[in-house]
Amino acid sequence: MNFLISNPVIAFIVFILLGFVVYTGTKLFNEVILNKALKVRHQQMRISTVAKGIKARVTGLTVATLVPMAIIVAFVAVGTNTAAINVDKNLLSINSSSDIFEIYEDFNEKLNARNTSWSFRNTTNDMANPETALDGFDGSSGDYDIKTTGSGSDDYSETNNQVIGVDEMDNVLTDGKFIYTMNYNKIQITFAGVMVGDDFDASQIGLYKTFEYSTESCTDAQFYPQGMFVDEDHLIVIGNQYNYYCGEGQSKGDVELPETDKSEVGSSETGEDGTEPIEKDEDGLISFDDDVYVDYHYMGYKSSSIKVLVYNISEDFSLQDEYSMDGYFTGTRKIGDSLYIVTNNHIPFYLEDVNLDDYLPTYEVNGIEVDADYEDIVYVEGTSPNSFTTFYGINLDTTEVDMEVILGDSGYNLYVSNENMYLVGTNYYFWPILNTLVDSVTTEESTFDSKTAILKVSIGNAEVEYEAFGLITGNTLNQFSMDEYEGNLRITTTEGWWGEEINNRLYVLDENLKVVSMLENLGKVGETIKSTRFVGDYAYLVTFEQTDPFYVINLSNPENPVVEGELIIPGYSAYLQPLGENYILGIGYGDNDGGTAGLKIAIFDVSDKSNPVILGEEVIFDYSEHGWGYSSATYNHKDLLVSVEKGIIALPFNTSSYSEKDGYSFNSGILVYNFDFTNGLDYSGFVQHEQDSVEDVYVYKSKFISEYFYTVSNKYIKVSTLLDVEEILYSSDLEETVYSPYSSDLEE
Amino acid sequence: MFRLKVKEEEHKRIKDRLNLIETPKYEYVLTDDKDLSENDKINIVFNQTDISKISKLLDIIVRGEDTYLIGNNEFGQKRVECRNFHYFIVEDEDVYGVLNNTKLLIRLKLYEVDELLKSKDFIRVSKYCLVNIGKIAYIKPELNSKLNLLMKNENHVEVNRGYYKEFKKTLKI
């Protein structure tokens, strides 16, 4: 019926045909009955009746009835198939933009029935505007006279990935010969050294190449790298490209907004994914802070796309392929030659006469554009149809691109195993049809609780395909809240915010994302999950309010998970990483009279699962009363360098201290510990690039190549050895970059 | 009208040979066993060797007496047994009896013909037309509750809406 409502012409034809069928059917029925009665009457009258052509007439009438009926059945079958729920995957497929409007209106109708107002957030971006082509990706903007002949080392640190074999994007990489750094609008390639005989020679370190992308021009699209992958053949740069609304040289004045944005007069809003707030006055003009904006005024972007630049390392970093996907970046992974990217395209239903064709996900491969077809879009019935979430699989070898477009709430937390991608978000609204997917909801009414929605998309050989959708209670913390093991997804969530309302759960979901088992009320009253790590049959979980219960959960029987061990210590670990099978590294915060402060590094010995113990720990409060100290490794695992083979743990640590005499001083460096499974942690050193600097020289990454230890800041790459990390042997300057207030940071 | 009372295994065969239609209400009992005859009915006890004669007898019983009508056409006056008429129709206030190839001007009013042929399986299908049920070849339902009757002479006659129910009733539908 919905299909017919949305296709009035077909509905009209079906209606006419249906009328015809009813007419001919009735006529045929009457005719047969009447003539049968006539025949009987004739027999009673002892008259032999030989009606000529009666068979032909009945056949004709039957055909006249059945043919339109067959046409109607065909119409209905096609219509029903297109809108029918695929029971296996709970999907509604889509054939045209009107299907999407219908889904949207149906969804809102249900919301209104619950007296709930719901509107889409207005944003300044207008995807309908065509992008300005961006030139200049090919070839570096800076080449340096460095001899790079020779091969690099095979012994170097890779990105600290969650899943072995699933590469995560990062801002500093090495391939054993070069170090790739990302700095605002630049990718800089520093020659790290080559093998000379059996030894690695790091003495010739120097900046080799710089790719500078954005031109600070209002006429060109602006490209900002967000991260990189590197393998034996390719350097892959992924970034956002924006077309800005901007005006020039009007720092003391106001810049007029395009017409479409004047509706938001007097408002201040934040665009999606990092757009800065825009202040508008009564005339629809944007006000600027005089001393910040000197030459250009970027007033939010009108379109955004994600670019993937593939450079060929063997051909001196020549640009090999260029991919572009419109929308906003959600996440990416690389497995072998397959690059997977997830994007999000918001659908502005609030606009009058919105043409969905303009918002359909599109991608380009070396300038050839491909649009998604409506038939390719899948919709999980019951989810809010507010955006397109697109999963791309890019074969870097053949440049083939596969896409799977899903209409629904976008997610933000991406976990990728070697076989599947799981995109997790929060679903605020959903409908009874999904209740079968929800462990605790049995009501026939719509539900407004926030749930964690999980989209599962299978991957392999750069192909992507929707697999399943699931809903569970509570919110996930980060990508480490999830793990796929033997076909099951294990996932931890926290529900509630305060006191007894809080419920921490661990779910085991099957391959269709149906709940196999659940452990709940993990942790003590009021505690929330601070970190999770799954290692094979075990889950390690940290909850916290005032102390750190470290739980060991046995998942060897997925249907019956049990808490096997518990350890209570002050402070808590915000990140857990396995060190082999029997040890877990925890990075987090120390205890500060019941609160948290500083940095705490702990190694848990979990060889006896029922009795986890601390093998070694370090707590650092290295700052003054008015200062602060933190490590980005507590929230970004890729900033942590761990090598069990080399017995090294390195992570950035920053402090700021204040004295009346000198004011604030900033210290940033890489903290390095050696460890072994007998003695635990042993302080190795703190590598700084500038001491007590008045400006932020932020040392944020460390890598090793052979026995050399490389530390990276926004100004330098410095080289020491793993044996003596503090003694700087060599140093290479990185070109400084003027910080832009609009540099976006969309790291996952 | 008839009830056939013979051995069960012979019932269908004899019924077919007699071209007999049995009805729940009946006046005649046909049987080959006099013990099966019924007191309040007209009983025809026959020998199976006389089935063809019985069949002719049944024709006479069903036809009843012959009724003749006199009419004129361009070749003069004709006397025709009523069952040969396909239908009677009023044209320019004259009543015509339509035969297979010709029609006769009948010097009667249509209601008089109707009255005369009441027991002869004729039925009014409109104010102006009286149809011989035995001469209807095929019935086609039309829109608006009308019926189009194809007669055995290939003429078409329409059953008006007002006579539709009566027509169906006559056919026992």
Image: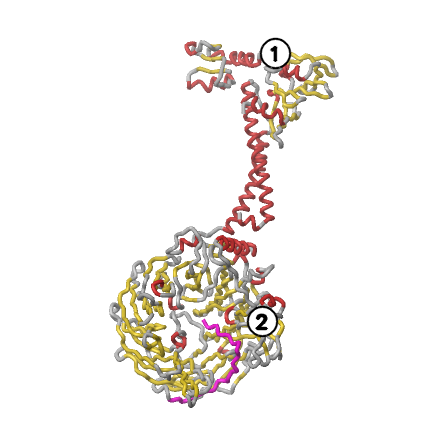
Span shown in magenta: A727-748
| Residue A119 in picture, x, y percent from top left | 52, 60
Residue at 40% in and 55% down? A437
| A703 over A497 or under it: above or below | below
What amino acid is found at the position of numbered circle 2 in the picture? Lys
Tell me, yes or no, if residue A195 can be seen here. no
Q: In this view, does A677 lie to the left or right of B19?
A: left
For the view shown, which residue lies furthest in the bottom direction? A661
Residue underneath mark 1: B66
Contact between marks 2 and 1 (CB within 8 A): the answer is no
| A482 over A255 or under it: above or below | above
Spatial distance from mark 2 to mark 1, Cα to Cα?
107 Å
Tell me, yes or no, if residue A616 can be seen here. yes
Residue at 47% in and 19% down? B13
How did the renderer colour the structure? secondary structure
**In front of the other: A661 or A725:** A661
Q: In this view, does B73 lie to the left or right of A16?
A: right
Q: Which chain carries label 1?
A: B
Residue at 29% in and 59% down? A560
Q: Which chain carries label 2?
A: A
Question: Magenta span has A739?
Answer: yes
Which numbered marker is on residue A280?
2
Magenta stretch: helix, strand or loop mostly: loop
**Dot 1, how many residues are within 10 Å of its Cα: few (below 14), some (14-19), or many (20+)?**
few
Please, what secondary structure does the residue beneath circle 2 have?
loop
**Dot 2, how many residues are within 10 Å of its Cα: few (below 14), some (14-19), or many (20+)?**
many
Which of discs 2 and 1 lies nearer the camera? The answer is 2
